[in-house]
Image: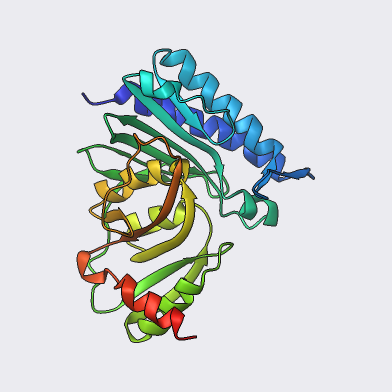
Amino acid sequence: MDYKLELKAAIEAAKCAGEKILEIYRKDFKVCYKADESPVTDADIVANTIIESVLRERFPDDGFLTEESVDDDSRFTQKRFWIIDPLDGTKEFVKKNGEFAVNIGLVQAGQVLLGVVYAPFTKTLFYAVQDCGAYQVKDHVEKRIHVSDRIDSFRLLISRSHPSKKTEGLLKVYDEQIQSITKMGSSLKGCLIANGEYDVYYNFGRSMKWDTCAVECIVKEAGGIFMKLDDHAIDYMEESKVNHGFYIINRSENKIDVEKIKAAVSQK
């Protein structure tokens, strides 16, 4: 299958949600906090409604897992299901630094069939379909994207809003191999590794399935590697929605030794 209809619908939904997100972004908006102290705004809720409306109308037999809707596990009774983060990088949205995105992925039998990531602030679209490559669309120009070939030294991305002692350990242990360090928020980190601008990102903390699903497809189709810290694939069919760490790298040569990082942290 080529999933042309699914891809077209996902892109449409992401862009429609993105327009509404930008509309709210440019105004004063209220910030509330969930039980886990993560922020949520009207933009998260409205974008979620838009995306679900578009996709449920086109594909009524599909299941859904979204950050802003109650999960009843009914997705596991469907042949396939969508995993959605209507506003990935809400902390960056609140800070108004532009580093947020809309994430839409489609899963069947544990495989991510397609991924769409749309950055409303820069109007940049990233998308991929399984076995069909990854693409970027910006300023009406579409191009196929690939990870870089850099291995002697790498360009490192680290989270802007989620500092980690293990990240500090990584900086210490691999100081001589790091060409540059850039802080950034949201799934855009993975997309910028996919298009060759950066090479390495390690997440040592807690993330959710909707944070990783869409961008995983884009990274892999661009030739990159996206795995859990234990070198196993993320399981989108498991009941838990939580990921306990993952990494994105351009080449296997840039894989770091997590045990060295742990040792460096424990020495402090």
Residue 4 x %, y %: 30, 25
Rendered residue at 39%/75% (across/down): 262
| Residue 227 position (above or below residue 209) | below
Quadrant (top left/top right/bottom left/bottom right) for the N terminus: top left
Tell me where residue 5 appears, x and y as whole percent: 34, 21
Query: Within the image, what quadrant is residue 170 found in?
Result: bottom left
Query: Toward the viewer: 195 or 201?
Result: 201
Q: Which residue: 64% across, 53% down? A: 91
The one of 76 and 132 positioned closer to us in this rendering: 76
- Above or below, 49 against 222 in this view is above
- Looking at this view, is 266 or 110 the one in front? 266
Q: Which quadrant holds residue 204? A: bottom left
What residue do we see at 56% from left, 62% from top? Answer: 162
Residue 252 is situated, as x and y percent measured from the top left of the image, at 21, 65
Nearer to me, 206 or 15: 206
Residue 122 falls left or right of residue 245: right
Residue 2 spot, x, y in % from top left: 23, 26
Q: In this image, 155 relative to 120: left or right?
A: left
Q: Answer left or right for 118 relative to 34.
A: left
Residue 52 drawn above or below residue 152? above
Residue 165: in sight, yes or no?
yes
How is the protein colored in the picture?
Answer: rainbow
Residue 139 visible here: no
Q: Residue 203: name its quadrant.
A: bottom left
| Residue at (31% x, 50% y) in the render | 219
